[in-house]
Image: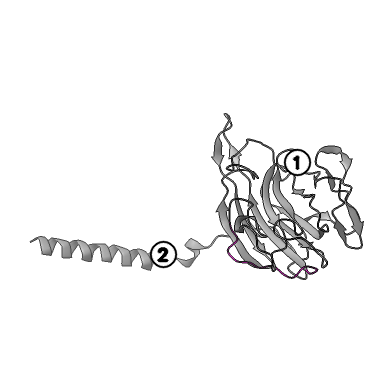
Amino acid sequence: MRKLFLLTVALTGGFFMANAQQTAKHEDTEFYEPVPPVVTPGKTNSEPPSDAIILFNGNNLNQWVTTDDNSKPAQWTVSGDYFTVKKGTGNIETKRKFKNYQLHMEWRIPANITGEGQARGNSGLFLASTGKGDSGYELQILDNYNNKTYVNGQAGSIYKQFIPLVNANKKPGEWQSYDVIWQEPTFNSDGTVNTPATVTVLFNGVLVQNHVTLKGETLYVGQPKYKAYSGGAPIKLQAHGDKSEPDSFRNIWIRDL
């Protein structure tokens, strides 16, 4: 009897499923609103799309200020279509604050770079700058084409947190690129973390960070931890201060998400 009952249930269920498929229409799963806005892509993957905010246009640093004194314009040196760290002037950051975004940036280690380990073209892209100095969330910039260091401190790493999936470095003197998808952290009213930050990074077109969940802000000493902020944050570039020749940057644009 039980077998007969189960067979009857199966046949009945199959009948209703088949009937539902026969009465369904292809229009049931087709949507026409909301219509996505039109964005014209750049001619190459590195060129900004039509809705991008240009953070460096090849002419000036009007979109940037000095990190430790936001009343002072960025002092780094503009030359041709790129700009270069000017030693002794400190970090720079964007005038504008950003929440969630897509960012493209190109950077170059000098061809005549000297030093080794962390003292070889060291800089950093801070995905959200939360204060003076080196506070925030850092994506490392360094020459690791043929330069050994701790792996969570090499180029493409989320500094002191996440090792890059691969080493995609080009030789010093060649332009390299970062493409970043950043989701900022959110915080509860008492300052505790509501949702942690996440980031995806392509290094020279190669995936090196795959939607990783950050443990907190970057710390040189100690474990990373979150510090509450709201309303977005600037994007910062680091003047590391080591003795090696300074790095250069160009073609920086961002899209709000």
> Could you tell me which secondary element the residue under label 1 belongs to?
loop
**Front position in the image: 248 or 200:** 248
- Is residue 2 shown left or right of residue 242? left
Q: In the rendered structure, find residue 100 and report the number of the disc placed on it.
A: none
Q: Is mark 2 on a helix, strand or loop?
A: loop
Q: Where is residue 256 in the image (x, y as percent from the top left)?
A: 71, 51
**What's the distance in space between the residues labelled 1 and 2, CA to CA?**
61 Å
Is residue 214 among what the camera can see?
A: yes
Please provide percent x and percent y for residue 222. Answer: 59, 42
117 is higher (above) or lower (below) than 135: below
- The residue located at (71%, 61%) in the rendering is 178
Prevalent SS, magenta region: loop
Q: Where is residue 255 in the image (x, y as percent from the top left)?
A: 72, 54
Q: Does the magenta stretch include residue 169?
A: yes
Report the front residue among 206 and 56: 206
Label for residue 24?
Answer: 2
**Is residue 68 highlighted in magenta?**
no
Read off the magenta span: 163-174
Residue at 56% of width from left, 45% of height from top?
A: 215
At label 1, the amino acid type is Gly
Residue type at numbered disc 2 = Ala
Residue 133 is labelled as 1
Give the position of the N terminus as an image quadrant.
bottom left
95 versus 19 height, above or below: above
Q: Is residue 34 left or right of residue 94?
A: left
